[in-house]
């Protein structure tokens, strides 16, 4: 996955070099977490430490080599040390598409974090003009919901309150990805049937909240073009540190453009081997006719 035309290709996150002192601090923390999780005895810990010294490894690597821990155990320990929520056997399983939660140290997750960094510099650094970010794409199957969900997740891992709004009133998916109640949501707000208890907190990601669609309405375009949607977005960007908005594919009509104009910013997603240049150009042209800021484009290789 690449982001923005002027960016370099992302690469797999590689181990960093630390001083002897910082390594000792980090390894000690990882060692404690693995020891407690695997209920290792003092004798087993000493064997790991001896092997670690002899082979010049880290504690987690030594524990895996000796069979006292698995690679997943080490990832769980890292996720706890660096406060990255990670699904484990004791938690409800995350949806497989939530790679930033299931595999927080993978190449894909690192790509999302790099995209997050660029967005902070390009969009969210300006606190005087707060905008929601609409994720838009030309066609169905471009990976828009997958992208929006994982982007919202990595923003929530910064600690600020992040809201993911499912504004795809035609084919909503965010309630499925996060396993939240979808009996009521955005469609009820816009039709004047609900104003409370529609935003769901995500247990696995303490700083993440999701506003699902609720019932799919027969008039999606009319709902997002109502003044109520613009007022709602202004209220939400004032209450949350980051607001990410999933939108319908542009092939459905002008829903995505209308939503984006009320969000204030857009990130255009295209998919390798699927998106057509003329469709992307048409979408960008439509977005440029609004007051929204196009912050960049993402090439989805998945």
Image (cartoon, helix red, strand yellow):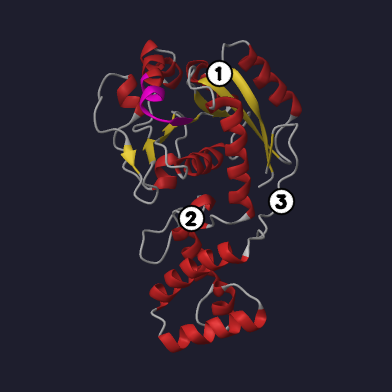
Residue positioned 59% across, 84% down in the render: 51
Q: Badge 2: how crowded within 10 Å, few (<14), some, or many (20+)?
A: few
Dot 1 and dot 3 residues touching (CB under 8 Å): no
Q: Nearer the viewer, residue 279 or 6?
A: 6
Judged from this view, the residue extending furthest toward the bottom is 43
Q: Badge 3: how crowded within 10 Å, few (<14), some, or many (20+)?
A: few
Tell me, yes or no, if residue 220 can be seen here.
yes
Q: Which mark is residue 33?
A: none
Q: Helix or strand or loop: what does disc 3 sit on? A: loop
From the image, which quarter does the N terminus lie in? top right
Q: Helix or strand or loop: what does disc 1 sit on? A: helix
Number of numbered discs visible in the structure rendering? 3
- N-terminal label among 2 and 1: 2
Q: Which residues are magenta?
A: 235-244
Q: Which residue is the site of mark 1? A: 257
Q: Is 58 part of what is drawn in magenta?
A: no
Q: Which residue is the site of mark 3? A: 11
The CA distance from mark 3 to mark 2 is 21 Å
The CA distance from mark 2 to mark 1 is 38 Å
Q: Helix or strand or loop: what does disc 2 sit on? A: loop
Residue positioned 47% across, 83% down in the render: 45
Q: Nearer the viewer, residue 244 or 56?
A: 56
Q: Is residue 141 left or right of residue 199?
A: right
Mark 3 or 2: in front is: 2
- Residue 62: percent from the left, percent from the top? 58, 78
Mark 1 or 3: in front is: 3
Q: Badge 1: how crowded within 10 Å, few (<14), some, or many (20+)?
A: many
Q: Which residue is the site of mark 2? A: 82
Mark 2 or 1: in front is: 2
């Amino acid at each position: 996955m690449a982001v923005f035309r002027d960016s370099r290709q992302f690469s797999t996150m590689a181990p960093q070099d630390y001083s002897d002192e910082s390594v000792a601090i980090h390894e000690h923390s990882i060692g404690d977490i693995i020891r407690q999780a695997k209920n290792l005895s003092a004798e087993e810990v000493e064997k790991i430490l001896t092997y670690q010294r002899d082979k010049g490894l880290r504690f987690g690597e030594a524990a895996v080599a000796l069979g006292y821990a698995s690679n997943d155990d080490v990832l769980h320990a890292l996720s706890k040390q660096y406060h990255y929520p990670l699904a484990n056997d004791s938690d409800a399983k995350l949806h497989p598409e939530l790679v930033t939660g299931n595999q927080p140290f993978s190449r894909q997750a690192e790509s999302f974090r790099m995209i997050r960094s660029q967005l902070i510099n390009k969009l969210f650094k300006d606190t005087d003009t707060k905008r929601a970010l609409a994720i838009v794409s030309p066609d169905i199957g471009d990976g828009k919901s997958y992208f929006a969900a994982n982007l919202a997740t990595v923003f929530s891992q910064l600690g600020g309150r992040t809201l993911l709004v499912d504004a795809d009133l035609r084919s909503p998916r965010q309630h499925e990805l996060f396993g939240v109640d979808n009996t009521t949501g955005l469609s009820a707000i816009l039709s004047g049937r609900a104003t409370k208890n529609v935003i769901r907190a995500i247990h696995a990601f303490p700083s993440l909240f999701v506003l699902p669609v609720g019932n799919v309405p027969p008039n999606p375009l009319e709902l997002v073009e109502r003044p109520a949607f613009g007022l709602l977005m202004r209220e939400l960007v004032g209450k949350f540190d980051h607001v990410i908005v999933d939108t319908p594919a542009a092939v459905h009509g002008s829903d995505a453009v209308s939503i984006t104009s009320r969000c204030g910013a857009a990130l255009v997603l295209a998919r390798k081997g699927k998106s057509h240049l003329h469709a992307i150009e048409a979408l960008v042209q439509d977005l440029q006719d609004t007051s929204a800021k196009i912050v960049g484009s993402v090439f989805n290789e998945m």
